[in-house]
Amino acid sequence: MSAPHVSTESASPAEHVVDVVLSVVAEVTGAGPHRLTDSFYDFGGTSLDAIRICLRVGRELGVDIPPETLLDSEDLAAFASAVAPAGGAR
């Protein structure tokens, strides 16, 4: 099942990254909705989940994201901010 389509016609690049992150995290974890203040570990995220999330977010944004980026982020907002400089320019 693919991530829900999020219309980003009027969204800023940073908002697009946030939408992609939240959508993919919800899909991979099977839980949600998630908030930007949620920690990856708060909802039981595993290293395999981190790999899946980073691969899918990277594919959506056209960038490579190492799983450590998510694993080392304090919350989903920090992850989205780390990803935004690379994926926001798309």
Image (tube, rainbow, N blue to C red):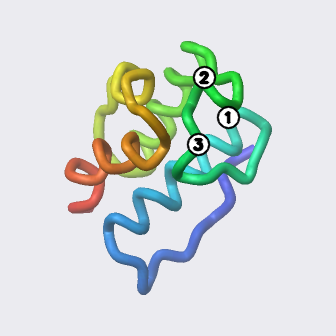
The residue tagged 1 is 28
The residue tagged 3 is 38
In the rendered image, residue 80, in percent from the top left (x then y), is placed at 39, 48
- Mark 2 to mark 3 CA distance (whole Å): 15 Å
Horizontally, is 13 left or right of 60 in the view? left
Horizontally, is 49 left or right of 82 in the view? right
Amino acid type at circle 1 is: Val
Give me the residue at 46% from left, 58% from top: 18
Q: Nearer the viewer, residue 78 or 47?
A: 78
Amino acid type at circle 2 is: Asp
Question: Which image quarter holds the C terminus?
Answer: bottom left
> Mark 3 or mark 1, which is nearer to you?
3
Amino acid type at circle 3 is: Asp
Point out the residue furthest to the top here: 47
- Mark 3 to mark 1 CA distance (whole Å): 15 Å
- Mark 2 to mark 1 CA distance (whole Å): 7 Å
Give me the residue at 42% from left, 65% from top: 16
First in sequence: mark 3 or mark 1?
Answer: 1
Q: Are marks 2 and 1 in contact (CB under 8 Å)?
A: yes
Numbered circle sitting on residue 49:
2
Q: Nearer the viewer, residue 14 or 40?
A: 40
Residue at disc 1, secondary structure: helix
Give me the residue at 39% from left, 40% from top: 79
> Mark 2 or mark 3, which is nearer to you?
3
In the rendered image, residue 53, in percent from the top left (x then y), is placed at 53, 33
Question: Which image quarter holds the N terminus?
Answer: top right
Residue at disc 3, secondary structure: loop
